[in-house]
Amino acid sequence: QVQLVESGGGLVQAGGSLRLSCAASGRIFRINEMAWYRQAPGKQRELVAGISSGDSTNYLDSVKGRFTISRENAKNTVYLQMNSLKPEDTAVYYCNVNGYSASAFPFRSWGQGTQVTVSS
């Protein structure tokens, strides 16, 4: 079983920055894609940013140029650097990781979520 532990959320004023981290642990053979999703109250969960094993990235249009996703493979960790935050970025942010376990079974795991609140 693969567990994800997130950190870095909090309260910040508009225009500020936060950095989210998500570390995967367990019997992991290989991690493929790592991603960040978010869910605001009353809205569906949406993909914010993703990064492949080859470091290709994709972003939600509304965060392009403000957010940067990166990964540190040696630590099985994915980061989301969020700059120029806006009140509409307020949401619970979840990391998502997929790959193969040490038993060669595919896995897809979710983090517990971390609250990001941007005040105006």
Image: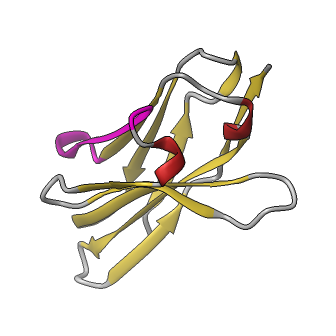
Looking at the image, which residue is at 39% across and 35% down? 65
Seen from the viewer's position, the closer of residues 110 and 82 is 82
Which corner quadrant of the image does residue 31 belong to? bottom left
Question: Is residue 98 found inside the magenta-colored segment of the image?
Answer: no
Position above or below: 14 against 92: above
Q: In this view, does 107 lie to the left or right of 17?
A: left
User: What is the quadrant of the N terminus in the image?
Assistant: bottom left
Looking at the image, which residue is at 23% across and 61% down? 52
Looking at the image, which residue is at 56% across and 28% down? 8
Q: Is residue 118 left or right of residue 19?
A: right
Question: Is residue 73 found inside the magenta-colored segment of the image?
Answer: yes
Position above or below: 61 against 91: below
Which corner quadrant of the image does residue 114 belong to? top right
Q: Residue furthest left?
A: 54
Check the image and tell me how it is coloured.
secondary structure
Q: Is residue 57 left or right of residue 9?
A: left
Looking at the image, which residue is at 35% across and 58% down? 34
- Which residues make up the magenta segment? 65-76
Q: Is residue 101 left or right of residue 9?
A: left
Residue 75: percent from left, percent from top: 25, 40
Residue 13: percent from left, percent from top: 71, 14
User: What is the quadrant of the C terminus in the image?
Assistant: top right
Residue 29: percent from left, percent from top: 20, 67
Position above or below: 113 against 100: above
